Amino acid sequence: MKLTGAQIFFECLKAEKVDVIFGLPGGAVIDIYDEMPKHNIRHILVRHEQGATHMADGYARATGRVGVCLVTSGPGATNTVTGIATAYMDSIPIVVFTGQVPTALIGNDAFQEADIVGISRPCTKHNFLVTDVRDLARIIREAFYLARSGRPGPVLVDLPKDVQNAKIDFKYPKKIDLKGYKPTYEAHMGQIKRAYTAIGKAKKPVIYAGGGVIASSAAKELKQFGESIKCPVTTTLMGLGGFPAPHELWLGMLGMHGTFRANMAVATTDLLIAIGARFDDRITGKLDEFAPTAKIIHIDIDPTSISKNVKVDIPIVGDCKDALKKLLRLVKENPISNLKKVRKPWLDQIQKWKETYPLAYEQTDDVIKPQYVVEKLYELSKGKAIITTEVGQNQMWAAQYYHFFEPRTLLTSGGLGTMGYGLPAAIGAQAAFPDRLVLDIAGDGSIQMCIQELTTAVENNLPVKVAILNNQYLGMVRQWQQIFYEKQYCATCLKIAPDFVKLAEAYGALGLRATKPNEVEPVIREAFASPKPVIMDFAVNPEECVYPMVPAGAAMTEMLLV
Amino acid sequence: MRHTLGVLVENQPGVLSRVAGLFSGRSFNIECLTVAETLDPEVSRITLVTTGDEMIMEQIVKQLNKLVSVIKVIDFREVKFVDREMALIKVKAEAATRAEVLRIVDIFRGKVVDVSPTFYTIEVTGDEGKIQAILDLLEQLGIVEVVRTGKVAIARSKKG
Ligand SMILES: Cc1ncc(C[n+]2csc(CCOP(=O)(O)OP(=O)(O)O)c2C)c(N)n1
Ligand SMILES: [Mg+2]
């Protein structure tokens, strides 16, 4: 039977088991939308295409499945770029379908034409322009495969209008043949053995894990491995949830706003075991002084991540889970003798660091501290919420004061640092998990960047909760001005702001406000009890700073601690 | 250091811009680049010359391999190879110098491919050193224009 391109589109999505699309129509995808009601697939209408990409991304991070969005050509397509770049930097599998002008008009500056394949080339894992309906099914199949396999990432498929209308016999290709794409999953046993020999000799090892552990569903193996060699574990922002926070080996997050003990441990370790992390500058600080005394093992599925910034001694290309399983086998066959005794001085040292400079803040009676709000959110959600964040101080306080037990419970824009990410990402996660508590820890600046999606939440009964840590500033930028630019607060004051309670109500959500410390808990309780989307506006101490802080470009031991 | 890479890519629209975009986006250098179809019409071959230290070269090769459209990267740092380039050189050839131009062309085993009363256009192939040498000699007689193809390179076959 002959099917149109639009019909094929839905058949392919069914074959990929897609259950929800985040999108917004326009002329160049109207044929797909016209076909949509005939198919049993949920569509969530967004209010801005950036929102659609973050929702697909939030859905993907929360579930591990591929998130999907559908937008029109031209401005619809260009509006997705920030969301695509966000997913790209954090290796999140999404497939973005964009409408395109008919093939005959491409290149003619047609109405709502944009070269989105050209525009998105540097921020997608791969992208496609479908010029012939006969290629459509194969390309969609490849797009999903590319998005989710290897090091995951966003893939864009551009669909000219005539391709959506053309008819052919439909067959979903079973096999994929991409000559230039063969990710390495299997870690090389020789390298694993070399790594384990180094581990056996190490006195002060540290595991530094990143988002790769979550992408490869290796949290369980990471915990077993850490325990089996009694090795302290720190993670990046992207790795939070990859190792259970309340654990004797847990160091907290490392990096610019990492804990004192995590950064000190990395600065003095003799063996750094990097797993699914990429030595980003927010982690390494000054490169020459990063882990200066360490031998480095690096496990990563992406060879380009290895020895990109920091020269690695034992590179292991492969899936984190596979590598960890193999390491665990070696531990089992040949456990480290006297482990407890061998490790004691190192663990004692770490304990000392922990006691000297724990994460701390002071809560008085009159002004709400943002850290206090996050601690209360943690306490009252029993640590069971899916947390999304915006970007800035709110994000760092969420990372420091909410504790993550499980992978896929912190969804945050780590690599790109995209303000506006949190609310739509929360909506995407809530669409996947309607019964879970999904909570966006937000800033008063960032929340305004995708606030329109509150309507999407209301319309689709997705009761996300937003906690705005309202400091009346673009706080993180102000923090830099405060510390490094003599308090010249140029263009960071947000005193002129909407009334977030009224705004929530205008959108049909619930709005709540706390201005005193003793109002924090009742507001959170009321919000969590509400069946609606809620905005909680917490008036927090305006000039609070995130500590510890390593100034950009400084060595990781040069932490500002107050 | 300068290095030559051979890159086999899918012969499809946009692939060259993926490769070029990779270099510009990561501020790697391209000194010269040539592209043409291979025996397999679905595959094109890019030869490019780039510069970088050990760590940068390793990144360039890995990043190229990471592109979905790239089938294979041949790193000529690791194999013996032959490379050639062609140049078309338009040089002044007036009565006093015509013979001298022809002598030089002859020595370099070049060819005169276009003749006018005052100019010769010369075709010459060779490795970089040879092209540079003939350019240096002809420069003194007055070069008007030079067009170079950029390098192509192929691995040497194993001997014996
Ligand atoms: C889209 C975007 N624009 C600008 C920035 C730069 N930036 C980083 S943090 C920040 C301040 C965010 O303010 P707010 O959301 O109120 O968070 P706070 O730091 O106050 O908690 C800005 C402007 C960014 N990360 N993303
Ligand atoms: Mg703020």
Image (spheres, coloured by chain):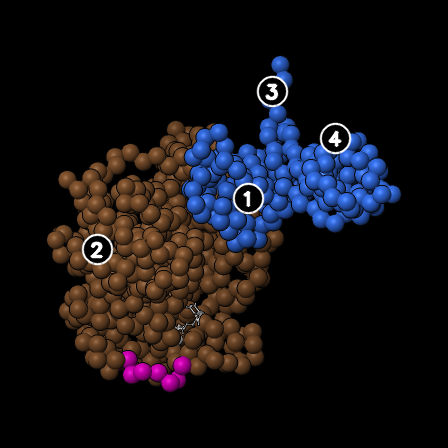
Chain colours: A brown, B blue
Above or below, A113 against B46 in this view is below
Tag 2 residue: A32
Q: Chain of mark 3?
A: B
Tag 1 residue: B60
Residue type at mark 4 is Arg
Tag 4 residue: B109
Q: Residue at x 47, y 80 (%)?
A: A491
Residue type at mark 3 is Lys
Q: Do marks 2 and 4 share a chain?
A: no
Q: Residue at x 40, y 53 (%)?
A: A117
Residue type at mark 1 is Ile
Tag 3 residue: B158
Q: CA distance from mark 2 to mark 4?
A: 63 Å
Q: Residue pushed farthest top?
A: B160
- Which quadrant holds residue B81? top right
For mark 2, does the 10 Å Cα neighbourhood hold few (<14), some (14 to 19), or many (20 or more) residues? many
Q: Chain of mark 4?
A: B
Q: Residue at x 59, y 30 (%)?
A: B154
Q: Do marks 1 and 3 share a chain?
A: yes
Magenta residues?
A494-501
**Which label sits in the foreground, 3 or 4?**
4
- Out of A218 and A66, give the one closest to the viewer: A66
**Which label sits in the foreground, 2 or 1?**
2
- Out of B98 and A90, give the one closest to the viewer: B98
Circle 1 SS class: helix
Q: CA distance from mark 1 to mark 3?
A: 27 Å
Q: CA distance from mark 3 to mark 4?
A: 28 Å
Residue type at mark 2 is Ile
Circle 2 SS class: helix
